[in-house]
Image: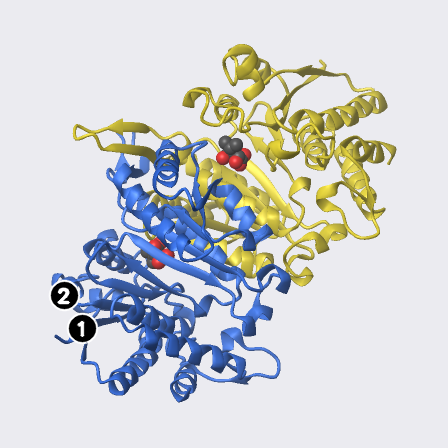
Chain colours: A yellow, B blue
Amino acid sequence: MSKKILVLPGDGIGPEIITEAHRILDWVIADSGVAIEVEEGLVGGISYDVHGEPLTAETLKAAQASDAVLFGAIGGPKWDGTVAYDKRPEQGLLDLRKGMNAFANLRSAVCFPALADASSLKREFIEGLDILFVRELMGGVYFGEPRGIETLEDGTRVGLNTQRYADWEIERVARVAFEMARKRGSHVTSVEKANVMESGVLWREVVTKMGADEYPDVKLDHMYADNCAMQLVKNPKQFDVIVTDNLFGDLLSDAAAMLTGSLGMLPSASLSDEGPGLYEPIHGSAPDIAGQGIANPIAAILSLAMALRYSLDMGGYAEKIEAAVANVLESGTRTVDIMADGCTKVGTTGMGDAILAE
Amino acid sequence: MSKKILVLPGDGIGPEIITEAHRILDWVIADSGVAIEVEEGLVGGISYDVHGEPLTAETLKAAQASDAVLFGAIGGPKWDGTVAYDKRPEQGLLDLRKGMNAFANLRSAVCFPALADASSLKREFIEGLDILFVRELMGGVYFGEPRGIETLEDGTRVGLNTQRYADWEIERVARVAFEMARKRGSHVTSVEKANVMESGVLWREVVTKMGADEYPDVKLDHMYADNCAMQLVKNPKQFDVIVTDNLFGDLLSDAAAMLTGSLGMLPSASLSDEGPGLYEPIHGSAPDIAGQGIANPIAAILSLAMALRYSLDMGGYAEKIEAAVANVLESGTRTVDIMADGCTKVGTTGMGDAILAE
Ligand SMILES: CC(C)[C@H](C(=O)O)[C@@H](O)C(=O)O
Ligand SMILES: CC(C)[C@H](C(=O)O)[C@@H](O)C(=O)O
């Protein structure tokens, strides 16, 4: 039976960077002889423009029927505030995550040695940095009801969102974190705000119990989210695996990615219990540089590598791609976002060429 | 009529650092001849231990009847998870903020030149850094109802919190930010997550309207909270005033404070429309070093300076204290948290002595 990858380039720099990942995928197919069917679809603003929906039922069905979805980026000023709230590009991504049951978002903040000097942090704070975030992706304030903007009788308008976590939602994502930690540094830091939020109290209780009952071999710490934000800046190397909710994970993993100086480099995987995985760069659609051919395609290419490893059982090719990326960086080939003295500047396609050549 | 300051040392290192601020206050009283009545009270875990409540009605009354409250820090492992949720030390602080109507929390992330090397960031990224956070402090998920942990019929437990912002809550805090910006760099960055939360949509709408109608001279940007977390790491000097909600403000201002390498140095002021202000260090109760006489009292002393400036109309003494702190740092006197080669290490009292001597 042939395997299937759905490619959703999306908006902004999405199409440019995904084109490069697609070229690498074509090479993998040719080189391995494995039959991988590649389908393309629309998501986000472009899907709204064409179909009036940021994610159509057909595209979601195609995603569910695939082995992996490779996603580019979505959104941009074109749609900001100009389309109905439930039709905005971001809703397409949220519906895709939900529809694929992708509850565990894995994002690593890894420092590429060749790029350590691109960071605002001193080298000694990030050299060797390797944090894995396990972010809950299907719950919390992103999806909780009730929500919306209501007008009270006296005319006051109130914006409302609900943070809601069931014990089983916490359990399933915590389990992923503990399992990952066993394969890495055996250290989980669970992050919430239990000192002001009851959802955090339940979070801490569930994670504590699972740690004690099932993973006594894994070191477990608890940290308030504000303290975690500080500790990431102060001493990021203290962390191994960080497990946290949807909203805290959004902020903290982005801050951590930026610590490494390699934001344009970092891929993510969103996994369900069974079924296809969703793979996407951590960075966004960068509308300011879209269409100029200068975006860094490495995060998209490394997202493809993750898809090959986790969803297509082709870990060997994932390693080849990762090694090619490392070699290209060592050789001094750089897109503008990671440019440094003495390196050779290339565009999106040039970077794709260099990685393909490796 | 004599002025009144209520001093609430709280838990952990709170009493040690507040003792030093109190000595400075005694000097201000003696030197100025201004009659300032100083009262002491309990708050947090110590209040719970003595009275069974983290904030008694009497203490809140005393706070409301004062011109300023100088607060140390609260909480610690002694009470974590061992007392009922509505009796935990943090509830004392939240009730105090609410009871004082302190809706605008001003926190600056300033880089002290003498300490620039203590940061994990390279000097060029933080030298001259001066960000003012205006954090909404009386609303959002900190106070929204419904909240709690419920058990469903099938036994599932659900942790629940509610983010709720009324238009007038957003307006009053945004106004503080715009007014502050006019006295500084004339640039406000408003931070929310409007792309996933309707409360953020209303936030953006209200701030946009106020900016256009009343502060057209102030540059206004909007930024998603995850992007703000990244931008703080990437290029913190792009910011002047950041206005955001209670929860985002908690995380982002802590991360920003840590960027400067000077967390033990940073004071905060929580202001209401009228009535007393609440002044407290940004740092927490640091239970791990409590009682050792090594905590850095500078944030507490600078909080006193803010109280003198904003609530007691004694800005001249605030400047004197701030200058004394700067001089002591320049001279190389350091507590252990900011110790560097070639400097003289002192304890909490030693730092207080040095600042008094100046
Ligand atoms: C685009 C947006 C909806 C999304 C999120 O908030 O989850 C993005 O920031 C991310 O982290 O993938
Ligand atoms: C102690 C805690 C309740 C408090 C908060 O979350 O507001 C603290 O982190 C702060 O920022 O002052």
Where B181 falls versus B198 (above or below)? below
In x, y percent, where is residue B229?
Answer: 51, 47
Check the image and name the residue furthest to the right.
Answer: A357
Image quadrant where residue A107 sits: top right
Write the residue at 50% across / 61% down.
Answer: B258
Q: Quadrant of the C terminus of chain A?
A: top right
In the shown orientation, is residue A264 left or right of residue A220?
A: right
In the shown orientation, is residue B67 left or right of residue A116?
A: left
Q: Quadrant of the N terminus of chain A?
A: top right
- Is residue A146 visible in the rendered structure shown here? no
Disc 2 is placed on an element classified as loop
Contact, CB < 8 Å: mark 1 with mark 2? yes
Q: Chain of mark 2?
A: B
Could you classify mark 1 by the number of other residues whose Cα lies within 10 Å: few (under 14), some (14-19), or many (20 or more)? Answer: many
Write the residue at 31% across / 28% down.
Answer: A149
* Inter-mark Cα distance, 1 to 2: 8 Å
In x, y percent, where is residue A56?
Answer: 52, 13
In x, y percent, where is residue B221?
Answer: 47, 42
Q: Amino acid at mark 2?
A: Ala
